[in-house]
Image (cartoon, rainbow, N blue to C red):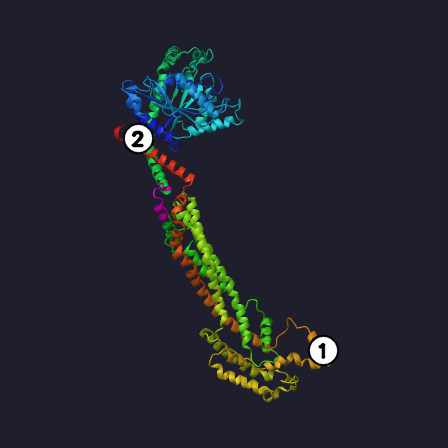
């Protein structure tokens, strides 16, 4: 059991060297109001004058005080943390000879045998950080005292609770000190030593109030009542010491401090403890053996040992967990570079492999929050690009008047008997051209995704690159340059794919021929129906215009001059209907074209006066005749049919072109490009320059890992050799 407290002291030293507060070690924190006697209690426990004393706020920084009991016969054994070279023949070698001494963490191996020097060093170190005008700081001072006349303890002396700021203390000094105290006593492995002066009411004790906030059950709070000799005449602390006023589970211990006059008169702690014992025997004879500084020291030692024993298993688990975490963290930072050439080649190869794997979907780190790499390229091809093409209306931007105008413009000065092919080609090219923009946008989206993969590989797959910011930037530049170089080539190919479709309108395409054959049958059926309904549909008092504009009766229509060619055209259409060509279908739909074309002209003779035809405005919207309507429908259906064929081709060929000219080309040439651009002797040292931040973090992680491993060994040795 006695070996447990030195274990904690060793652990404290281990973690102090790396300046980390990640392990909550068992210790005793002294809490109380300003000038309640906290420092005096600590001095009594040490048995030496070593702490600054006086009125007002004296303790302005936390003091972590480790008391180490040493055997006067063999000091070397228990002081193994000192440099072995300091010792010679069991005596201190560097001109230091004494059985009691102290050491500060901030002065390294300097040994203080004069305790006045220790007090002066505490004052100097306090002023160095906190200033010399009552300011406070939460940065602790670490002091270790070695003596054969003390028990093993780890104590923390905290600034006293105060209410009113003095000197250059900030207005919220009460809050600052309170937070500082809570920072230490909130540690579940901390025993709280709540110090209260006997000449104040226990019910107003700030120390007990703060202790209750973090330890409501009082499982780790020990109350100390100071200044028993300063109580008013006629009063005593019997009820308080018996626990009748405020019960505390760990108990209440009364002590008598030295007065300021005693300190000024250089009264020794040994004399003070003797006088304290005499006072207790005289004033509280029944409680004398359960009060006093010596009893307090033994009680604290016993409490701390049992507390450490309870905390040790959990502490060991925590240290092992942290060691594993820091080992993993250190591995992620990588080893310092020794062979720059091999390291550079390895990083370039790893990046290129991860880049290709991200596209292929075989990367080690697969993104779960969003599509990435090859999956996103697939989404662009089949969802984004596919849906965009499907949303393009085959007849978008094309009105019936546009179609009619194109037909009439294609006929020239002569009225045409059939719908001209030129109008179809002209209009279908205009529609096919609309597929170029979405296709180029598809290339752009894939290029952007290829760019994003660089960042993905940097963040997730090749974290080593973060160590070398210059190499990272150089790799990003090379890959970006390669992508930029392939973009115009891919765009040109996609542009050509659309241009190829525009270059030759293949009306003999199998899918197009089938569509024409289907439409032929529909239009022939409609023509026959119209022919059957025509006599009854036309009123007898209305005349039909002949080809020359003369009127004739409906009954004369079948034998009318000019009807022969029309019927011949119809017969010819029937004859060619079985071939499935669109030309035959157009002829079938052409009955009455001549008369329809002449309708605008035939109306002019009826006006009986001269008209300048160039002044007649062309109607923008008007009701189309049946013939015009039919012609437009035929052209629209043909455009739609051919457009769907081209769209299908483009939807299939653009992704293939992008994959070949951009994605696959970059995948295949990425590594050779990176090696060619970056693997040069002149660039090696510059590219593999580590960021200062990374080097510092690696050193910190290595120090912490070393401390944790050492702490683990310390605990393991104790658990193996000391049983309880």
Q: Residue at x 34, y 30 (%)?
A: 311
Q: Residue at x 53, y 65 (%)?
A: 434
The residue indicated by pointer 1 is 611
504 or 292, which is in the foreground?
504
Q: Residue at x 64, y 87 (%)?
A: 553
Horizontal side, residue 308 vs residue 137: left or right: left
- Residue 14 percent location from the top left of the image: 35, 30
Q: Which badge, 1 or 2, is on the more N-terminal residue?
A: 1
Image label count? 2
Camera-side mark, 1 or 2: 1
Which quarter of the rendered picture does the C terminus lie within?
top left
The residue indicated by pointer 2 is 714
Query: How many neighbours does mark 2 have within 10 angstroms: few (below 14), some (14-19), or many (20 or more)?
Result: some
Q: Would you identify the image quadrant in which residue 253 lies? A: top left
135 or 476, which is in the foreground?
476
Q: CA distance from mark 1 to mark 2?
A: 117 Å
Q: Secondary structure at mark 2?
A: helix
405 or 356, which is in the foreground?
356
On screen, residue 664 above or below 64 = below
| Residue bounds of the magenta highlight | 333-346
């Amino acid at each position: 059991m006695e070996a447990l407290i030195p274990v904690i002291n060793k652990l404290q030293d281990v973690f102090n060297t790396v300046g980390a507060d990640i392990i909550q070690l068992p210790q005793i924190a002294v809490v109380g109001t300003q000038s309640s006697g906290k420092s005096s209690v600590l001095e009594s426990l040490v048995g030496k004058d070593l702490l600054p004393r006086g009125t007002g706020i004296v303790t302005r920084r936390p003091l972590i005080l480790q008391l180490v009991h040493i055997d006067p016969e063999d000091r070397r054994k228990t002081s193994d943390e000192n440099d072995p070279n300091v010792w010679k023949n069991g005596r201190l070698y560097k001109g230091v000879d004494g059985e009691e001494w102290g050491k500060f963490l901030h002065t390294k191996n300097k040994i203080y045998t004069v305790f006045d020097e220790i007090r002066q060093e505490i004052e100097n170190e306090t002023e160095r950080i906190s200033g010399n005008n009552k300011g406070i700081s939460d940065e602790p001072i670490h002091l270790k005292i070695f003596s054969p006349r003390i028990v093993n303890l780890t104590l923390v002396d905290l600034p006293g609770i105060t209410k009113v700021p003095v000197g250059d203390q900030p207005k919220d000094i009460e809050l600052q000190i309170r937070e500082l105290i809570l920072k230490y006593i909130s540690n579940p492995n901390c025993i709280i030593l709540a110090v209260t002066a006997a000449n104040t009411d226990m019910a107003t004790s700030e120390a007990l109030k703060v202790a209750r906030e973090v330890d409501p059950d009082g499982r780790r709070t020990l109350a100390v009542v100071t200044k028993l000799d300063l109580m008013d005449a006629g009063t005593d602390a019997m009820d308080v010491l018996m626990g009748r006023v405020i019960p505390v589970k760990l108990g209440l211990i009364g002590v008598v401090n030295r007065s300021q006059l005693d300190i000024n008169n250089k009264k020794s702690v040994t004399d003070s403890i003797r006088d304290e014992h005499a006072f207790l025997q005289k004033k509280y004879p029944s409680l004398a053996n359960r009060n006093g500084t010596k009893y307090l020291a033994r009680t604290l030692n016993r409490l701390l040992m049992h507390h450490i024993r309870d905390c040790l298993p959990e502490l060991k688990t925590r240290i092992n967990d942290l060691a594993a975490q820091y080992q993993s963290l250190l591995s992620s930072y990588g080893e310092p570079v020794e062979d720059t050439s091999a390291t550079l080649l390895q990083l370039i190869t790893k990046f290129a492999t991860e880049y290709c794997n991200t596209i292929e979907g075989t990367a080690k780190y697969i993104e779960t929050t969003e599509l990435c790499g090859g999956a996103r390229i697939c989404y662009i091809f089949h969802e984004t690009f596919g849906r965009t093409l499907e949303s393009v209306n085959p007849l978008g931007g094309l009105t019936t008047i546009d179609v009619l105008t194109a037909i009439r413009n294609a006929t020239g000065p002569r009225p045409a008997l059939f719908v001209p092919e030129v109008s179809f080609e002209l209009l279908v090219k205009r529609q096919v051209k609309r597929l170029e923009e979405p296709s180029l946008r598809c290339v752009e989206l894939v290029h952007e995704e290829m760019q994003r993969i660089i960042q993905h590989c940097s963040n997730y797959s090749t974290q080593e690159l973060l160590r070398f910011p210059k190499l990272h930037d150089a790799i990003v530049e090379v890959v970006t340059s390669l992508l930029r170089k392939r973009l115009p080539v891919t765009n040109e190919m996609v542009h050509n794919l659309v241009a190829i479709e525009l270059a030759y309108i293949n009306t003999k395409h199998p899918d197009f021929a089938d569509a024409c054959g289907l439409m032929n049958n529909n239009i022939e059926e409609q023509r026959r129906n119209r022919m059957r309904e025509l006599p009854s549909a036309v009123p007898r008092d209305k005349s039909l215009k002949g080809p020359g504009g003369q009127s004739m009766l409906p009954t004369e229509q079948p034998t009318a001059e000019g009807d022969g060619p029309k019927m011949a055209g119809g017969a010819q259409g029937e004859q060619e209907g079985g071939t499935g060509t669109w030309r035959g279908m157009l002829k079938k739909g052409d009955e009455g074209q001549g008369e329809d074309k002449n309708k605008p002209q035939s109306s002019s003779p009826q006006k009986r006066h001269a008209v300048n035809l160039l002044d007649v405005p062309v109607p923008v919207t008007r009701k189309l005749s049946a013939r015009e309507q039919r012609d437009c429908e035929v052209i629209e259906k043909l455009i739609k049919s051919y457009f769907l064929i081209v769209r299908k081709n483009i939807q299939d060929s653009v992704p293939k072109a992008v994959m070949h000219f951009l994605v696959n080309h970059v995948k295949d040439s990425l590594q050779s490009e990176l090696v060619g651009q970056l693997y040069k002797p002149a660039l090696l040292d510059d590219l593999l320059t580590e960021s200062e931040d990374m080097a510092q973090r690696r050193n910190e992680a290595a120090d912490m890992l070393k401390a944790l491993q050492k702490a683990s060994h310390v605990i393991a040795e104790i658990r193996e050799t000391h049983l309880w």
